[in-house]
Image: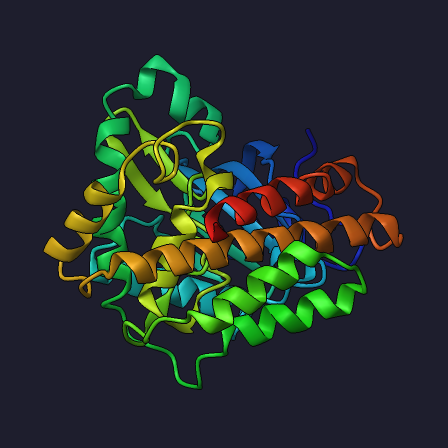
Amino acid sequence: MTDGRETDGRGTTGPGGVVREVFGGAARVVARSRLSGGASRETWSVDVADAAGRRHALVLRLASGPGPAGGLGGELEGGLRGEAELMRQAGRAGVPVPGVVAATDAYLVMTRVEGETIPRRILRDDLYRDARPRLAAQCGQALAAIHRMPVPGGEAADPLRRWRDLLDLTGQPHPVFELAFRRLAGTRPAPAGRVLVHGDFRNGNLIVGPEGLRAVLDWELAHPGDPLEDLGWLCVRAWRFGAAPPVGGFGHYDELIGAYERAGGRPVDRDALRWWETFGVLKWGIICVMQAMRHLRGGERSVELAAIGRRVCENEWDLLRMLD
């Protein structure tokens, strides 16, 4: 391990430089490790000793790459500064989130919340046996709090139009996706309201401890929209990771909806929720196509992206089952 006096080769300050900027020139990185995930932003777990010898357990995100979600184009304005402000607002609203230590256009420094984010472990390990029955309700409570947060200005984009355009940009024929667009357009429910939507609330973006939900992560895709978009996305089959329960692989619809409504969320129409869940499967399928195109067209050669591309057919099958 170096002392952190480095850049990442692209002119972006590395972890050591950020630590000295935030805590002063005498601060030292005493341990660090690159965290998995984050296709467009480096994420580091960092232990810091400041000039007084105090230890700080932190997570550091560095701005890099083409944008949130690997070039999908997040809706959140302000980059990492905007994400930090949202997290501060979320904390005030009662959403469990890491504390923001510092944020600039180049980096976001947060307190490190201990726990598990890997869905396979959350859904299968004995350590989380007591957490699993609680998670659906805890997610409902967290989503109700998110949907009480101030709504950013600007018009909510038409989700079908946006993802229709993104699929067209790939130049790839996918008849099942075309069928899904047609069916969803013809059965679109009335809006349930206009709120701040987290945009990627799912198993994998949650920190879980033995007692349950500890923190909600990854706010860069937040945008104004329909509250059922978040609930439907959490229920998408891909985020069950092979487990049977429909809510994140750990819970059931009644648990999620009941807790959401009791915590002050808008009343949930079950048919509308199924529409948004179906839309979520279509959206994830298109994301899989786009990630594969990044690999195949040379934007980023990656076995991980190629493997995600192979999941397109899973989403096509899921859509056919849901559209029946």
**Farthest residue toward the front?**
324
Residue 202 at x, y percent in the picture: 42, 46
- Say if 242 sits above or below 233 in the image: above
314 or 133: nearer the eye?
314
The picture quadrant where one finds residue 144 is bottom left
Instruction: Give residue 122's position: percent from left, percent from top.
Output: 39, 26
Q: Which residue is painted at 25% across and 51% down in the image?
A: 142
Side (left or right) of 167 relative to 204? right
Q: Residue at x 31, y 29 (%)?
A: 209
Compare residues 60 and 41 and report the one nearer the observer.
41
Residue 265 lies, in percent from the top left, at 19, 62
The residue located at (46%, 55%) in the rendering is 278
Q: Considering only vertical position in the picture, is 9 above or below 2?
A: below
- Across and down, in percent, residue 172 comes to 79, 59
Residue 195 sits above or below residue 233 on the image = below
Q: Quadrant of the N terminus?
A: top right
